[in-house]
Amino acid sequence: NYRLFLWKTGLRAFAGSPLLGIGLGQVTWWNQFLPFWRFDPLSVHTRGLGAHNDFITYIAETGILGMIALQWLFWRLFRTGLSSFRRLHTADQTKQFLMLWVPVCAGLAGFYFRTHMFYSIQGMLTAFLFALLVKQCENNLQTREQSHRTSLAA
């Protein structure tokens, strides 16, 4: 019941300010500015808690504009990985790449269902995996360009 109450409150906060949201970090303080908060019996037990869902938290805090920016980042990460995957030539390269790309894709999908993707230890792991994916894609591209130059020279 607590989680459903927090999700409902996050969605109501988004509905109140759908374009720009209520501001980053504000969901833990919504008891100070949401008038309906005081009248719900569950509010006493959930004071200071966030929405317990990254998607609801982020859309409530940043609104549609912030969610568009985040979805663009996710799309670029996925598309970068997909284009790099299509350029792999050996089974070893594919194995190494998939060992990284699959957890990144799982993390992107998990954004819609879990919490703490962008802060705490989970946030550090998310940033680390995203950085590893980008570096892997850069390395794959450089390797391909070098092999292409070598084949042209021969």
Image (cartoon, rainbow, N blue to C red):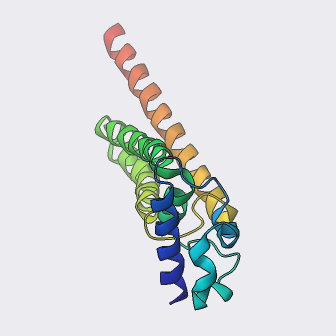
In the image, taking residue 107 as reference, residue 118 lies left or right, namely right
- In the image, farthest residue toward the top: 153
The quarter in which the C terminus is drawn is top left
State the residue at coordinates (61%, 69%): 34
State the residue at coordinates (71%, 75%): 48
Tell which of 97 and 60 is nearer to you: 60
Does residue 33 lie above or below 69 as drawn?
below
Does residue 26 lie above or below 63 as drawn?
below
Residue 85 picture quarter:
top left
Tell which of 47 and 110 is nearer to you: 47
Tell which of 72 and 8 is nearer to you: 8
Viewer can see residue 80: yes
In the image, taking residue 145 as reference, residue 115 lies left or right, namely right
Does residue 49 lie above or below 85 as drawn?
below
Instruction: Locate residue 153, reporting x and y percent.
Output: 36, 8
Viewer can see residue 154: no
Does residue 134 lie above or below 9 as drawn?
above
Instruction: Locate residue 18, reporting x and y percent.
Output: 46, 53
Instruction: Locate residue 148, reporting x and y percent.
Output: 35, 18
State the residue at coordinates (49%, 32%): 138
State the residue at coordinates (32%, 10%): 152
